[in-house]
Image: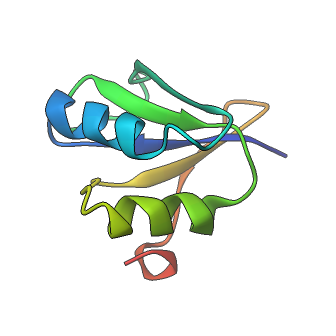
Amino acid sequence: MLSYYLFTFESSNKAMAAKTATKNIEDMRIIPLIPEISAGCGLALKYSGRELEEVVKVLKNKNVEFEEVYSVGEDRVIERVRDDLFR
């Protein structure tokens, strides 16, 4: 079962821009990147909601680039979300 999504970024500036762009979306916060995922910077945007497409739409409309999106399950199973769902 899905627990949350993680957005990764190539820089901490982009991670902070994503947080600012999504300030009106509940269940969003900046966290340290979990060790199971390797990315450009050590920060990730954690989204605990279920409307992934809406978050991606907001980021795109604000021209905020992200590297990848991962789903993290309750049992800490991590899966990369397919690119074609949001690119």
Q: Residue at x 28, y 31 (%)?
A: 16
Colour scheme shown: rainbow
Q: Residue at x 31, y 60 (%)?
A: 62
Against 59, residue 5 (above or below) is above
Can see residue 40?
no
In the visual, does 83 lie left or right of 76? left
Q: x, y percentage for residue 20?
A: 37, 36
**Residue, far right:** 1
Q: Relative to 19, is 83 above or below? A: below
**Number of callouts in the render?**
0
Q: Quadrant of residue 78?
A: top right
Q: Position of residue 56 (x, y in %)?
A: 48, 63
Say if 30 sits above or below 10 in the image: above
Q: Nearer the viewer, residue 12 or 40?
A: 12
Farthest residue toward the front? 24
Instruction: Give the left or right position of residue 13, taking residue 36 as reference.
Output: left
Q: In front here: 56 or 80?
A: 56
Report x, y in % for residue 85.
Answer: 52, 78
Q: In this picture, is 67 found above or below 7? A: below
Which residue is painted at 73% across and 45% down in the image? Answer: 49
Q: Nearer the viewer, residue 41 or 47?
A: 47
- The image quadrant that residue 53 belongs to is bottom right
Residue at the (35%, 68%) spot, across then down: 60
Most extreme residue toward the bottom, as rendered?
A: 84
Question: Please, which residue is most extreme toward the top here?
Answer: 32
Image quadrant containing the C terminus: bottom left
Q: Is residue 45 visible?
A: yes
